[in-house]
Amino acid sequence: MFRLASEPVLGRVLEAHGLRGFAVWDSQDWKCLQTFVGHGEPVRAAAFVAEDRVVSISGDSTVQLWDAWTGASLRMFEHMVPHALSMNPTKSLVAISGQRGAIVILDGPTLEVRADFQLPLVTARYEQRAQGQGSRPVHRIQALAWHPDGEHLLGGGGDFVTRMFHGHTGQVVAEWHGHSDEVIDVAVSAERGLLCTGSYDGTVRVWSLQGTQCLAVHELGHSDIGGLCLMGSALCVTVGIELRVIPLP
């Protein structure tokens, strides 16, 4: 699954392209501006780290830095199998998550390591299902988003928990519990002070960012949640091939 990303200044959008590449599109006329090919496995996410630089992660265990205008690969970072990335626009830092709670903070324009730590994850307890599925260990942070303060990150875990932790030390300062399956996407509304989480349990939850109170639970009736995107006073959710719009409290 590729997570869409946008760059609002010039109106560019990143999306998957072909089997192992991705592309930049002009959001005004949806013209393809550039394609990026070089990963050995499908690209999972990408983000602009500068007007002329793009970072991508792939199942081939690499993070790659690209020239946004020419599509040339400029640098590669190999450290772990990456699952999610989030760009800190105020500090040009990129957070990458991997297996066993691993988090790496990179300098966006150079891919130099700024921090490297591991979050404590627990063994998730699944509800009994028709197939007899019980508990199983889950060792990854599947979703990342920077907190509005620019210092902390929010990570959705395979152990059903969303955590807020410091971006340089990894110290966990808050946890949100309530999902009954893996948290696969997170989104933050700085203006409203809200945290939104999507899970394979088929729900989207809206939480207070100032505390850990759950403000709303939206049953989607399907576990195939592709991603969350905040648009003004609404939360856009992809469910299979459908786009749903949820009003925010």
Image (cartoon, rainbow, N blue to C red):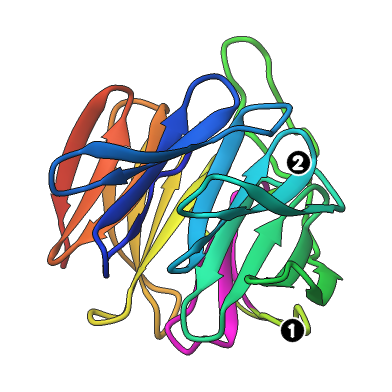
> For mark 2, what is the residue?
138
Q: Earlier in the sequence, mark 1 or mark 2?
A: 2
Q: Quadrant of residue 33?
A: top left
Is residue 151 magenta-colored?
yes
- Residue marked by disc 1: 168
**Residue 230, position as x, y percentages in the image:** 26, 60
Q: Residue 3: x, y in percent? A: 45, 43
* Closer to us: 134 or 94: 94
Q: Residues within 10 Å of mark 1 (few under 14, many from 20)?
A: some
Going 53% across and 42% down the picture, which residue do you hit?
A: 180
User: Looking at the picture, does residue 176 appear above or below residue 77?
Assistant: below
Task: Provide the major secondary structure of the magenta segment.
Answer: strand
Viewer-proximal residue among 2 and 215:
2
Residue positioned 55% across, 31% down in the render: 21
Number of marks present in the image shown: 2
Look at the numbered disc 1 and give the secondary structure of its residue.
loop
Residue farthest to the front, as pictured: 70
| Vertical side of 244 occupied by 191: above or below | below
Task: Please state if 202 lies on the left or on the right of 244 as rendered.
Answer: right
The range drawn in magenta is 142-165
Say if residue 232 shows up in the picture.
yes
